[in-house]
Amino acid sequence: MAEVEIFSAEVCPYAQRTRLMLLEKGIEHSLTEIDLKNKPDWFAEVSPYSKVPVVRRGDDLVWESSVINEYLEELYPHPPLMPKDPGRRALARIWIDFANVKLLPTWYRVFLEQDKARRAELAARLTEYFRFMEFEGFRKASQGGPFWMGKQVGLVDLCYYPWFERLPALEHYRGIGLPEDCTQLAAWIRRMASRESVKACAQDAAFYIQGYSHYADGTEDGVTARDMRAGTG
């Protein structure tokens, strides 16, 4: 029996963060897929927030993808996915926080917003965030390396990549893509897409376009959508 069990959903980018973590670390694990539209009754006992991912290891139940990934990093330190230097480690956490607090709430609100004028404001903000990530984030933090924090893939890469795999859905429904001057981010996306961990759990553009249709038409009523509408996501 695998030491670690992950409760996941293919469409969920937060869950993909942790699936990538498990695969990059080579951690033996079992996968329990949750239908987010028809969650089993027992799932409430596993996930107090009624969201994926959740990881179970022995008596530990851990939820929230960023917390899970640091938990796994502490338990399984090899290969390391956080810098050894305290300053660089703090910088990695700053960029993970930027994703969770700035980028992703705006990303989802662009999808959910039905008012065109308000959506245009959000789209402009999202584009600004992409450029901030390129010029203040990747180009500086990577120190010329191929990944966010340098030569090796790390938690920051796993934190961001799932949403860029879903970029075709954003382009399809909202006409928003990566700005042309974000050349290093574009190269990073291609580099990440070629990794074996990503290939093992990737989906194609059509899957995400279908999966995000209810976000785009404003009818999505899942936990993430409700949190984003309420400003608590």
Image (cartoon, rainbow, N blue to C red):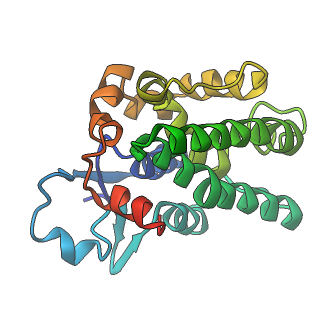
Relative vertical location of residue 196 with respect to residue 148 in this rendering, above or below: above
> What x and y, as percent, mark residue 165?
49, 30
Question: Could you say which is closer to the camera, residue 10 or residue 232?
Answer: 232
> What x and y, as percent, mark residue 209?
34, 27
Residue 192 shows in the view:
yes
Q: Which residue reaches farthest bottom?
A: 59
Taking the spot 53% from the left edge, 60% from the top edge, the residue there is 69
> What x and y, as percent, mark residue 127?
67, 35
> In which quadrant of the rendered image does the N terminus lie?
bottom left
Left or right of residue 155: residue 68: left
Taking the spot 28% from the left edge, 72% from the top edge, the residue there is 47
Taking the spot 46% from the left edge, 47% from the top edge, the residue there is 108
> What x and y, as percent, mark residue 132?
78, 42
Residue 79 shows in the view:
no
Left or right of residue 3: residue 141: right
When asked about the image quadrant of residue 114, the answer is top left
Relative vertical location of residue 26 with respect to residue 224 in this rendering, above or below: above
Question: Could you say which is closer to the camera, residue 116 or residue 175?
Answer: 116
Relative vertical location of residue 72 with respect to residue 200 in this rendering, above or below: below
When asked about the image quadrant of residue 38, the answer is bottom left
